[in-house]
Amino acid sequence: MSERIYKQQDELAKLIDRYSGQDGVHQTAIPSLFFIRESNVTEPLYGVYKPSFCIVVQGEKEVLLAQEHFKYGPADYLVASVDLPVTGQVIKASSDAPYLALKLEFTPSQILEVLSETDIQVGPKENAKRGMFVSQIELELLDAVIRLARLLENPKDIPVLAPLFTKEILYRVLQGEHGARLEQIAIEGSSTSQIHDVIEHIMSNYTKSFRIEELAEIANMSVSSLHRHFKEVTAMSPIQFQKQLRLQEARRLLLSESNDATNIAFRVGYESPSQFSREYSRMFGLPPREDIKRLWAKYDQRINA
């Protein structure tokens, strides 16, 4: 990387450190912009990535989408073009050099707005491609990110300038080596856009059972095409996608409400508590009660360290 990129990353690291202050995910005064700080290597963390642009300025992170690994650090950025259930883990961090990162969420309509206002040559509708990619950071992109983050020091400028700098960031990503993947989400009738509609439906109705024919109708695809394109975008089948959403929500409820596992199983859509326990163990490594006990023990160790 060039000396100028190093200097920009150093400035961005100082901004993130100043406005986060402590470990965790911190929403900023700029809508859709979040700062993340971690002083230690973390356990695998389960969650859903919304469509977002993520950049690490210190440390390293690995994201697991189904069985596919995405590793990125200060030389890279990661983009999720659709909602994706993932496992993320900070793999390089220390108290002296904490993991510092930035996440900017966006919508397909913002991508469409950039495409309609610029001279980017939109390609033809293509077969769906993976809804997540890692790419090498470039000077112009990092410069736009820094100008967005600097607005936190002049809050009165945020309403006017934040949308402009966000648009520039998306413009730079669209011009990058994987930009065509991102533009497909905004092209009406593209297979990526159709799969996005199916993902939104599952996200809103994950506790309910569905017939694959219903999803194919939403996508305006045959059942076989839906399966193929859905797996290409998400690296999993619609049923596996729904299962990850259910199990992630079940774990969140167990942690926040300390509720009975059987009751939680029914709430997230399972009809069989034994099946819930089996699938929970397969995903998180332990049955629900033991897993939650282990997580609380680790939390206590961290608080008392």
Image (cartoon, rainbow, N blue to C red):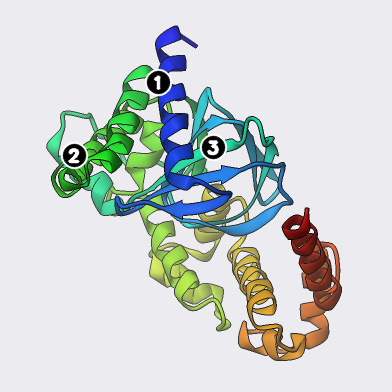
CA gap, disc 3 and disc 2:
24 Å
Q: Identify the residue at image location x=75%, y=89%.
A: 260
Q: Position of residue 36 (x, y in %)?
A: 52, 46
Circle 3 is placed at which residue position? 100
Q: Secondary structure at mark 2?
A: helix
Residue contact between numbered discs 2 and 1, judged by CB atoms under 8 Å: no
Residue lying furthest front in this view? 304
Up the image or down, 182 lies above or below 288; here it is: above
Which of pointers 2 and 1 lies earlier in the amino acid sequence? 1
Circle 1 is placed at which residue position? 8
Depth check, front residue: 59 or 224: 59
Q: Amino acid at mark 1?
A: Gln
Q: Position of residue 65 (x, y in %)?
A: 63, 49
Circle 2 is placed at which residue position? 164
Q: Amino acid at mark 3?
A: Leu
Q: Secondary structure at mark 1?
A: helix
Residue 262 as seen in the image, left or right of residue 215: right
Depth check, front residue: 72 or 82: 72
Q: Position of residue 287 (x, y in %)?
A: 85, 73
Q: Amino acid at mark 2?
A: Leu
Which of pointers 1 and 3 lies earlier in the amino acid sequence? 1
- Image disc number at residue 25: none
Count neighbours of disc 3 (C-alpha within 10 A) and say few if under 14, some if 14 to 19, many if 20 or more: many
Q: How many marks?
A: 3
The reply to whether residue 115 is in sight is yes
Depth check, front residue: 295 or 110: 295
Up the image or down, 248 lies above or below 46; here it is: below
Residue 240 as seen in the image, left or right of residue 272: left
